[in-house]
C-alpha cells in the first residue's frame, strides 16, 4: 500500500483537502472524541486500502480542546471508487440526566424526576420502545438523573421562553460523580411558560460546573425543553402539555392550512428528546427532501422552488425531519448507527442492472435497504473530505415503509405517503433526502409554494428515471416485501 503523506494538524469538522479550510457542515465523526481522546477510525475504513486515522489531543483532551477539534488526522493509501466505513452497531448510551426548572413556574404542573425517569427510561417508556424499534432491539438508552436544579431565574425573557444559552452556568452538586461513567449529558428543561429550542453539541466552557469544578471530558450533551402550562403564561390562551399529549393537528399538503386531528405515537417532548439524542449519537444532519415540482430532482429547476431541491428537515415522515406526518427513521441513519448490518443491506456500486427485493424496514429479518453508491462520487467531490468526515459515496437509498408500524402513522392523515411501493432517497454521501418518485407540481399558496411529498413511493407500473438510475418493474409481494429493478448507468 502506498502511503500518501497527507497529514493535518488541528483538524476541524470536515477538513477540506490540503487542510487549508474547513466547512460548516455538521457531519459525523469529526475526528475528535471529546470523551477520552482515544484513536478513532483505526479499522478498515474502506474496502480499497484508503485508511484514515484520527488522533485527538490525547487522553487528557479537555472539553475545550474537543470544541476546537485539536488533533491530528492521517490519511494513508489511495481511494478506490467506493468509500465504505465500518458500521459497528451502537448498542448503548449511558447518559447523565439533569432536570432543570425555573423558580417562577407552577411546580405542581411540571414533571418530576420520577415522572421523567419513567418516561425516558422506564419499562413502559415510549422513548425506549421507539429506540428499540428503530435499532431492531440493539440499542438501549441507559443512565439516571444525577441532578435536579431549580434556577433562580424566570422561565421567560422579554415575553418569550428562556433559551438554553440563557440559563447561565448550571452549578450541579453530584456527590461521587465520575464523568467517565457516561457518554453524554441530557438536560431536560421544564417550564410552564413555553418551549425553548432543543439543542445538542459540545458543552460551552462554563456551561456546567460539577461539584465546584469545570467539566473535564464529558462534553457531549443534548437539551430538550418541555412545556406544561398556558402558552406564554396566558390563561386565556391554550393549555399545552408537550410532555404527555399525543393528539396532534396536522396541516396536510394541499389542504391550504386545514388541520387533521390525529394521534401520534410520541409526545412533542418525546419526539424532540429523541431527535436531539440521535444528533448526539453523531447523526449531525437531518432527514431532508429533494423535490423539483413536477420534474426530476436533477432536471432544470422549476420556478419558485425555493430550497426544495435540498431542503433541510424536508422529510416530514422522519423523526430527523419535521416528523409531522410520521416518526420514522430512515434506513440510511439506521445503517450509520450500525443497526442495519451489511447482510441486511444490498449495495450497488457499479453500473449494471440489478433485481432487488426489500422487506418492510421494520422487519427483524431479511434485507431492508438497498443503496446505490455512485463510483468515484465522493462527498463534496473529494475522497479526503469524505474519508476524514466518515462519509461514503453519493447515491440513492431504497426502503419499503411498513404498514403495521406505529411510527409510520401517516395513513391516518389520509396520505398515501410511502405506501404501496418503494421509497427512494438521495444521499450526498452523508445526509439522506426523500425524493418524490412520482414528481408532481408544487402546491401554490398565497404565501408561496409547498413541495408535494404527500405521495412519494414508486408504485407498480411506474418508472423512475433521472438519467443516472432507472427504477422499474415494481412488484408488491404477498407479505409486504417489494421487488424492483435498478439500472445504474
Ligand atoms: Zn436537529
Image: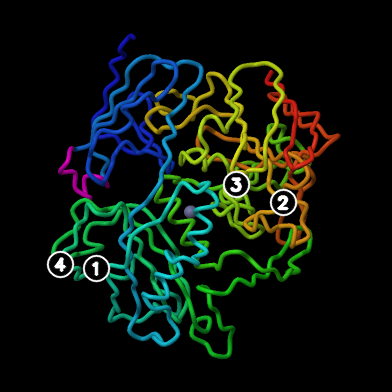
In front of the other: label 1 or label 2? 2
Work out whether mark 2 precedes mark 4 in sequence or the reverse, and give the earlier one: 4
Report if the beta carbon of the residue with label 1 is closer than 8 angstroms to ligand 1: no
The count of marks equals: 4
* Residue 4: image location, x then y, percent: 31, 14
Say left or right for 449 vs 163: right
**Left or right of 18, for residue 286:** right
Label number found at residue 169: 1
Name the mark nearer the viewer: 2 or 4.
2
Labelled disc at residue 211:
4
Contact check, label 1 and label 2, Cβ < 8 Å: no
What range of the chain is rendered magenta? 58-67
The alpha-carbon separation of the residues under discs 1 and 2 comes to 47 Å
Which of the two residues, 460 or 375, is positioned nearer the viewer here? 460
Q: How far apart are marks 4 and 3 (CA)?
A: 43 Å
What element does badge 4 sit on? Answer: loop
Within 10 Å of disc 2 (Cα), the crowding (few <14, some 14-19, many 20+) is: some
- Which callout, 2 or 3, points at the residue further toward the start of the chain? 3
Q: What element carries label 3?
A: loop
Q: Which of marks 4 and 1 is nearer the N terminus?
A: 1
Q: Disc 4 vs disc 3: Cβ atoms closer than 8 Å?
A: no
Amino acid at each position: 500500500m502506498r502511503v500518501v503523506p497527507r497529514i493535518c494538524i488541528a483538524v476541524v469538522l470536515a477538513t477540506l483537502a490540503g487542510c487549508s479550510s474547513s466547512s460548516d457542515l455538521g457531519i459525523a465523526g469529526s475526528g475528535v472524541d471529546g470523551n477520552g481522546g482515544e484513536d478513532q477510525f483505526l479499522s478498515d475504513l474502506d474496502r480499497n486500502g484508503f485508511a484514515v486515522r484520527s488522533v485527538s489531543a490525547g487522553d487528557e483532551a479537555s472539553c475545550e480542546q474537543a470544541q476546537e477539534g485539536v488533533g491530528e488526522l492521517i490519511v494513508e493509501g489511495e481511494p478506490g471508487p467506493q468509500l465504505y466505513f465500518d458500521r459497528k452497531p451502537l448498542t448503548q448510551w449511558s447518559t447523565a440526566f439533569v432536570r432543570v426548572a425555573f423558580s417562577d413556574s407552577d411546580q405542581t404542573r411540571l414533571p418530576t424526576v420520577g415522572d421523567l425517569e419513567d418516561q425516558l427510561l422506564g419499562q413502559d417508556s415510549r422513548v425506549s420502545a421507539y429506540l428499540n424499534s428503530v435499532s431492531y432491539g440493539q440499542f438501549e438508552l441507559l443512565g439516571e438523573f444525577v441532578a435536579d436544579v431549580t434556577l433562580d431565574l424566570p422561565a421567560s425573557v422579554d415575553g418569550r421562553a428562556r433559551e438554553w444559552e440563557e440559563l447561565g452556568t448550571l452549578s450541579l452538586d453530584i456527590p461521587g460523580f465520575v464523568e467517565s461513567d457516561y457518554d453524554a449529558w441530557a438536560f431536560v428543561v421544564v417550564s410552564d411558560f413555553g418551549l425553548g429550542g432543543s439543542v445538542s453539541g459540545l458543552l460551552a466552557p462554563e456551561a456546567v460546573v460539577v461539584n465546584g469544578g469545570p467539566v473535564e471530558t464529558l462534553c457531549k450533551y443534548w437539551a430538550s425543553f418541555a412545556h406544561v402550562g398556558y402558552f406564554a403564561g396566558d390563561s386565556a390562551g391554550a393549555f399545552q402539555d408537550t410532555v404527555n399529549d399525543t393528539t396532534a393537528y396536522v396541516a396536510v399538503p394541499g389542504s391550504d392550512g386545514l388541520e387533521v386531528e390525529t394521534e401520534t405515537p410520541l409526545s412533542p417532548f418525546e419526539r424532540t428528546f429523541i431527535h436531539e439524542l440521535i444528533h448526539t449519537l453523531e447523526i449531525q444532519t437531518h432527514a431532508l427532501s429533494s423535490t423539483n415540482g413536477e420534474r426530476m430532482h436533477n432536471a432544470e429547476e422549476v420556478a419558485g422552488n425555493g430550497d426544495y431541491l435540498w431542503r433541510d428537515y424536508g422529510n416530514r415522515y422522519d423523526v430527523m425531519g419535521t416528523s409531522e406526518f410520521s416518526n420514522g427513521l430512515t434506513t440510511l441513519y439506521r445503517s450509520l448507527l450500525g443497526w442495519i448490518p451489511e447482510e441486511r443491506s444490498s449495495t450497488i456500486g457499479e453500473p449494471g442492472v440489478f433485481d432487488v427485493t426489500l422487506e418492510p424496514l421494520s422487519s427483524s429479518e431479511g434485507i431492508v435497504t438497498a443503496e446505490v453508491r455512485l463510483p468515484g462520487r465522493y462527498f463534496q467531490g473529494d475522497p479526503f473530505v469524505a474519508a476524514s468526515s466518515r462519509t461514503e459515496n453519493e447515491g440513492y437509498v431504497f426502503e419499503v415503509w411498513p404498514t403495521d408500524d406505529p411510527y409510520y402513522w401517516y395513513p391516518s392523515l389520509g396520505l398515501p405517503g410511502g405506501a404501496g411501493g418503494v421509497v427512494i432517497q438521495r444521499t450526498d454521501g452523508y445526509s439522506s433526502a426523500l425524493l418524490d418518485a412520482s414528481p408532481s407540481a408544487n402546491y401554490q399558496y398565497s404565501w408561496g409554494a409547498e413541495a408535494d411529498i404527500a405521495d412519494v413511493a414508486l408504485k407498480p407500473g411506474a418508472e423512475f428515471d433521472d438519467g443516472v438510475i432507472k427504477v422499474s418493474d415494481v412488484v408488491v409481494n404477498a407479505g409486504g416485501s417489494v421487488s424492483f429493478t435498478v439500472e445504474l448507468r
